[in-house]
Image (tube, rainbow, N blue to C red):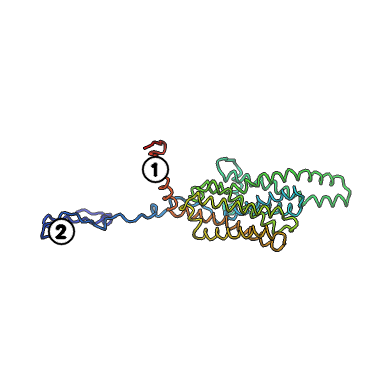
Amino acid sequence: MTTNPFDADRPPERRKRRRDESGPDGPGGGQDAGRRRRDESLMVPDVSFDSYYGRHIVKPAPWEKEVAAYLFLGGIAGGSALLGAGGRARGFPALQRAGRIGAVAGAALGGAALAKDLGKPSRALNMMRTVKLTSPMSVGSWILTAFGSFTGAALAIELGRPMLERRSRANGSGAVALLSKALELADGPATVGSAFFAPPLAAYTAVLLADTATPTWHESYRELPFVFVSSANLAASGLALVTVPSRENGPARKLAAVSALAELVAFERMQDQLGPILSEPLRTGKAGRLLKASRALTIGGALGAVALGGNRVAAALSGAALMAASVCTRFGVFEAGMVSAIDPKYTVEPQRERLEKRRAAGVVDDSITTAR
């Protein structure tokens, strides 16, 4: 008999019983004669979520912690630009300067983190060679560039005008006075431009995550932008509470209260929309611990900002709590998405649920809907 190496993988053959073994005197005699015995070894084992050759069903995003840091830094930059514009409109110079410095620092550090994740700084420059409206990364790169240009110009005007004014008073130079006047006129468009690109900068990172095939990120595309924008405003409010005197932190305290409420509501709605399966990575493991800490820090920081924000020390502590809450939110959502991509369960079970719903609704084909 010929053999091959795969014979060892074949299941053992069952021995056929002779007819006399089922007779009255055989082992299968009596009332059980003729009945087929069930071989427990042939029962179907319990289902286990796995994939071919142990590979992931969904390829995890090739991102490291630098991207999670960029999510936070881009958010704090956008929120700070809004507070800086508000400080200029309300006549709060300390809030205006702190917001502009925070916006430029956040954009610069975030851009550096993004370039580090890309591996080579030249790759960041190559992203500016084209505009692809269907790519959140391409659009986001241009948003970051425009935002950085306007906020950089606003900060340069913020720091340059006082020097020019002092020099003009000392020398009496008409050219210097004229240049100072031109900078004053340019301050308005720079402020408006930075405030215009601030919300897209805070929100596009959520669109970037939701545009991937990562289950938890992809299915939270409706609520995640609201979570990220609220978190960005929380971080910016916290930075302002730490750096701005208490006599000018009123707008930051109000923004902290509104943003805390908006983030808590949006995050709870996001978990409800995801359902018990896809929201599980947000509630368990490292991501769950980070997000629980974020919730506690958000509530504590917002209450401290509203009730005790007039005290300089209490305002600084509340601001630090709000910034830490934003960090935990971004890293928690990032970690939860990675977990949902690695475990096949978060891909298979939602697919089965969607299939059962289509069958219950009478959908027998993806393109044809009929009533049974």
Q: Is residue 37 left or right of residue 124?
A: left
- The local crowd at label 1, few if under 14, some if 14 to 19, many if 20 or more residues have their Cα within 10 Å, is few
Tell which circle, 2 or 1, labels the residue nearer the N-terminal end: 2
Report the residue that reaches farthest toward the bottom: 313
Amino acid type of the residue that numbered disc 2 sits on in the rendered structure? Gly
What kind of element bears circle 2?
loop
Count of numbered badges drawn on the protein: 2
Q: Residue at x 10, y 60 (%)?
A: 25
Along the line of sight, which residue is nearer the eye, 292 or 81?
292
- The local crowd at label 2, few if under 14, some if 14 to 19, many if 20 or more residues have their Cα within 10 Å, is some
Amino acid type of the residue that numbered disc 1 sits on in the rendered structure? Ala
- From mark 2 to mark 1, how far is it between C-alphas? 46 Å
Q: Which mark is residue 28?
A: 2
Quadrant the C terminus occupies: top left
In the rendered image, is residue 112 in sight? no
Q: Is residue 75 above or below residue 363?
A: below
Residue annotated with mark 1: 360
Q: Is residue 88 left or right of residue 52?
A: right
**Depth-wise, is mark 2 or mark 1 nearer the camera?**
1
Labels 2 & 1 near each other (Cβ < 8 A): no
The x, y position of residue 230, in whole percent, is 61, 51
Q: Is residue 242 left or right of residue 218?
A: right
Quadrant the N terminus occupies: bottom left
Along the line of sight, which residue is nearer the eye, 127 or 12?
12
Along the line of sight, which residue is nearer the eye, 150 or 210?
210
The x, y position of residue 310, in whole percent, is 72, 59
Q: Residue at x 89, y 48 (%)?
A: 172
In the rendered image, is residue 184 in sight? yes
Q: Residue at x 39, y 45 (%)?
A: 356
The x, y position of residue 223, in whole percent, is 55, 48
Residue 366's quadrant in the figure? top left
